[in-house]
């Protein structure tokens, strides 16, 4: 008989999210072709690249043979893969991730870890952040996503797997082992068919049973390296942090407009609010931008972008707003056709503030501090008020009484 002693792991907060798109390729196909919704869908021919949950209900699994999949589910619809569509959907989802927190570690085309520690004052609890993230992915990209929340990356990934499909699951720090130990050993990273076979042959079926074994005994069953790894995971030990790759290359924000038709003036006001938001984030990050991007999405999930590169890099709100309004005017013909459901602003081609090349003419270095332009002083004053009293303490008159959308965290890169 195996007996688990539920010792509590190292204290900490559950602030790591594992966000995993559900049946990604198949979900993109169902999104783009309404006739496929609710039907079993198999992406791929000779080998199953992805299967919708309707197909999975019949036992169809990724990487299985196409002939076997059709024997299990003869009425499945088989579609050819469209890798460019999946790549575009992935880029759009990762934009939502990076608008949620700058601490994003992508681990595949359809999943990532996000660290939301320290965002509670600005963006709410991890559960509130995850709820908003799931809603924004659904509204902005049209795809279902599951999010697991835990103290460690490993537990967050297990939580998202247990929470599928289209779910959200929190593992509180004081309930980690109560959640983990009843699960089958196959839930642990590194337990494939060979390792699970060895464990089952030894009489170990659950994580809790594995946890009762001394590390040395477990190593004798699965090997020294695997034994050390699995013993740590069985006790929820995972010290790895969310790792980002390099400095952020853009700062952006977007707003879902819904299905109701919007006037050009409403769209302009919404974009002005987004510019206030991203310009403030840019200054707080100590950065300037040279390129301004306008992003549009329509009700058929097609997208359009317009960009403008400035003569001189800037962090000035009004300079960025003029560029966005110029791009909006250029896009007016396609907006007039209707169906606009999302607008976004992104600032790219970033540089360190003070490190950008000066434009001529400029004052020589006389040792006398030049007067700070009025617009710069105004931007700084508004930033200070919003920092102290909240992002909506000062707003534009055009936005009074309007839906401002979800507030995004304001953090340095």
Image (cartoon, grey):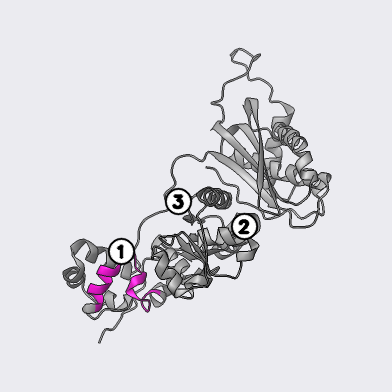
Q: In this view, does 257 lie to the left or right of 223?
A: right
Label 1: few (<14), some or many (≥20) within 10 Å?
few
Residue 307, horizontal then vertical, whole percent: 65, 34
| Relative depth, front residue between 5 and 153 | 153
Q: Please give the label number shown on residue 190.
A: 1
At x 65% / y 46%, what residue is drawn?
A: 303
Whether the magenta-drawn stretch holds residue 192 is answered as yes
User: Which quadrant, please, contains the N terminus?
Assistant: bottom left
| Relative depth, front residue between 407 and 43 | 43
At x 78% / y 36%, what residue is drawn?
A: 329
Judged from the image, the secondary structure of the residue bearing numbered disc 1 is: loop
Which mark lies nearer to you, 3 or 2? 2
- Quadrant for residue 62, please give it: bottom left
Judged from the image, the secondary structure of the residue bearing numbered disc 3 is: strand
| Magenta-drawn segment | 180-200
Q: Please give the label number shown on residue 32.
A: 2
Judged from the image, the secondary structure of the residue bearing numbered disc 2 is: helix
- Furthest residue in direction bottom, as rendered: 1
Residue 74, horizontal then vertical, whole percent: 49, 73
Label 2: few (<14), some or many (≥20) within 10 Å?
some
Between disc 3 and disc 1, whose residue precedes? 3
Residue 290, horizontal then vertical, whole percent: 61, 30
Q: Please give the label number shown on residue 105.
A: 3
Between disc 3 and disc 2, whose residue precedes? 2
């Amino acid at each position: 008989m195996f007996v688990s002693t539920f010792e509590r792991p190292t204290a900490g907060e559950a602030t790591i999210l594992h966000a995993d798109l559900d049946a990604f390729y198949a979900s993109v196909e169902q999104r783009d072709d309404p006739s496929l919704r609710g039907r079993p869908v198999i992406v791929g021919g000779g080998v199953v690249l992805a299967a919708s949950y309707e197909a999975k209900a019949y036992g169809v699994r990724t990487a299985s043979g196409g002939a076997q999949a059709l024997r299990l589910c003869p009425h499945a619809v088989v579609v050819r893969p469209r890798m460019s569509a999946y790549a575009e959907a992935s880029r759009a989802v990762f934009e939502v991730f990076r608008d949620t927190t700058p601490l994003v570690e992508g681990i595949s085309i359809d999943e990532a870890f996000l660290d939301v520690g320290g965002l509670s004052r600005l963006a709410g609890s991890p559960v509130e952040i995850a709820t908003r993230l799931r809603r924004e992915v659904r509204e902005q990209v049209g795809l279902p996503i599951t999010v697991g929340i835990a103290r460690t990356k490993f537990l967050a990934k297990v939580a998202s797997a247990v929470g599928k499909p289209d779910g959200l699951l929190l593992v509180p720090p004081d309930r980690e082992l109560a959640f983990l130990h009843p699960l089958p050993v196959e839930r642990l990273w590194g337990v494939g068919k060979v390792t699970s076979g060895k464990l089952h042959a030894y009489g170990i079926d659950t994580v809790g049973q594995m946890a009762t074994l001394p590390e040395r005994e477990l190593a004798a069953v699965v090997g020294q390296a695997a034994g050390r790894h699995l013993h740590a995971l069985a006790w929820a030990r995972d010290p790895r942090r969310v790792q980002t790759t390099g400095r952020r290359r853009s700062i952006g924000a977007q707003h879902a407009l819904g299905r109701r038709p919007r006037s050009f003036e409403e769209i302009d006001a919404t974009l002005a609010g987004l510019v206030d938001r991203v310009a403030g984030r840019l200054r707080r990050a100590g950065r300037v931008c040279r390129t301004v991007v306008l992003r549009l999405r329509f009700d058929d999930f097609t997208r359009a972008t317009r960009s403008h590169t400035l003569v001189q890099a800037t962090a000035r709100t009004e300079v960025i707003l003029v560029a966005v309004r110029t791009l909006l005017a250029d896009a007016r013909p396609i907006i007039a056709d209707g169906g606009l459901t999302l607008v976004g602003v992104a600032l790219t081609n970033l540089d360190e503030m003070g490190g950008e090349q000066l434009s001529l003419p400029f004052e020589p270095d006389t040792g006398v501090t030049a007067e700070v332009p009025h617009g710069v002083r105004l931007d700084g004053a508004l930033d200070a008020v919003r920092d102290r009293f909240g992002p909506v303490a000062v707003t534009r008159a055009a936005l009074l009484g309007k839906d401002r959308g979800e507030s995004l965290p304001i953090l340095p890169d």
